[in-house]
Image (cartoon, helix red, strand yellow):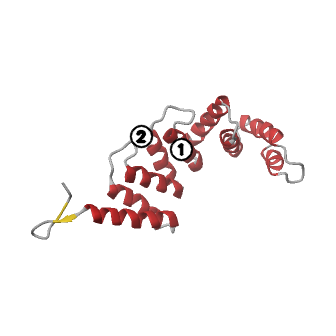
Amino acid sequence: MYNVANMYHKGEGTEKDEGKALQYYDIASELGDYAAKFMLATILSSRDDASAANVEKAIKLYTELANLGHPMAAFNLGTFYFSGKGVQQDVQSAIKLFEQAAALGVEEALVNLGNIYRTGFGVPVDLEKAAGFFRAGAEKNNEICKGLLQEVERENLSALHIGEKGERTLPL
């Protein structure tokens, strides 16, 4: 069923038909196919005309998959909690989901975590923690993390002042 859904979704070997693709992804999902559940959730939640019912179904599917350790499901669910799309906005839940996704190799989660702590969105500003997330991404050659790490390091340095005796102090 999943392969048939992909054929309709991509228009491979048949005409592209999103309605039929969704139908087959739904059937495969009901049969327990995790890849189909992920694709179904992704399509339902990313459509411009996504209804509240579709977003709710996507959240249910992403939650199930995230609980099973699916990295991108955890990341996508984290973005829902961060933005408040279809759920009550909850930055702490978003952070936990982004941390789960990052631990499973999703580099974009490192970018999000670093930015949360850099900007203090829902948490106290913590440039050291932000730098740690960006550093982890930079070590994986993530270009966005490399650039953000440089910015955070500059911000950290500019936040420090040199005292009368040459010691570093924080501005008052």
Q: Position of residue 32 (x, y in %)?
A: 70, 38
> Which of the image's four quarters has the C terminus?
bottom left
Left or right, 58 with reference to 112: right
Residue at 37% across / 60% down in the picture?
A: 131
> The residue tagged with tag 1: helix, strand or loop?
helix
Of the two numbered discs 2 and 1 on the same chain, state the one appearing first in sequence.
Answer: 1
| Local crowd size for mark 1, using a 10 Å CA cut-off: few (<14), some (14–19), many (≥20) | many
Q: Is residue 60 left or right of residue 158?
A: right
**Which label sits on residue 92?**
2
* Residue 103 visible from this viewpoint: no
Which amino acid type is marked by label 2?
A: Gln
Residue 143 appears in the picture as rendered = yes
Look at 59% across and 45% down and name the residue there.
73
Q: How many marks?
A: 2
Q: Which mark is residue 8?
A: none
Question: Callout 2 environment at 10 Å: few (<14), some (14 to 19), or many (20+)?
Answer: some
- Farthest residue, direction top: 53
Residues 31 and 141: in front is 141
The percent position of residue 19, horizontal first and vertical second, equals 81, 38
| Residue farthest bottom in this picture | 166
| Residue positioned most to the front | 172
Residue identifier under label 1: 79
